[in-house]
Structure formats: structure tokens, C-alpha cells
Image: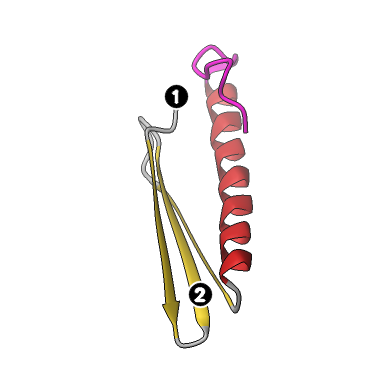
Amino acid sequence: DRITDVKTVLSKENSRYSCELVISVPSHSNIVIVREAGNLYTAIDEAVNISERKLRQYKNKLRSRKGRLHDVPEDYKV
């Protein structure tokens, strides 16, 4: 199963920056990550790191349910 859409919302509230990622994956509810930091780039980096971990967990869950990796395409790298 592949990522079908990623929406990114960057915002600033007072001196805090926020990065929100909404990742759409078929046959799964959206994966939503929100990170706040004093620096915009820090918020983005943290959100991306968490999204990689969450997608890896999703991929491993697919593997364990099916017993093999046939549902995850070869080009699906996290």
C-alpha cells in the first residue's frame, strides 16, 4: 500500500512554530503528526523523523498481518 497524499501545514503562533503532516495511506486512517518548536526547521525535522518511524511501523504491521511483503511494493522505501 502506498502513500496517496501528504498535506503539510506550517504555522507560527507567537514565537512558536508548528509543522503538521497528514499522510493518507489506503486501507488505513490518516497518519497525523504535529510538532512544535522554537525554530521552524526544528519542527519540520522532528515531524519528518516521526513520520518515517510511523510509516515504518505501518509497513511492519502489513508484513506481520500477511506473513510476507507482497502487499508492499518493492519501491516502497522508508
In the displayed structure image, the side of residue 8 where residue 17 appears, left or right = right
Q: Position of residue 44 (x, y in %)?
A: 56, 60
Q: Position of residue 38 (x, y in %)?
A: 60, 79
Query: Is residue 43 highlighted in magenta?
Result: no
Q: Along the line of sight, which residue is nearer the eye, 75 or 41?
A: 41
Q: Is residue 68 magenta?
A: yes
Residue at image coords 52%, 86% = 15
| Image location (x, y in percent) of residue 30 | 38, 45
Q: Which mark is residue 17?
A: 2
Please name the residue shown 53% across and 26% down the image. 62
Q: Earlier in the sequence, mark 2 or mark 1?
A: 1
Instruction: Measure the C-alpha gap from mark 2 to mark 1.
Output: 32 Å
**Label 2 neighbour load within 10 Å: few <14, some 14-19, many 20+:** some
* Label 2 vs label 1, nearer the camera: 2
Quadrant showing the C terminus: top right
Rendered residue at 46%/88% (across/down): 14
Tell me the residue that label 1 is attached to: 1
Q: Nearer the viewer, residue 74 or 29?
A: 74
Colour option used:
secondary structure
Task: Give the SS element for disc 2.
Answer: strand
Amino acid bearing label 1: Asp
Q: Which residues are magenta?
A: 66-78
In depth, the one of 20 and 61 nearer the eye is 20
Q: Nearer the viewer, residue 62 or 53?
A: 53
Answer above or below: position of 47 versus 17: above
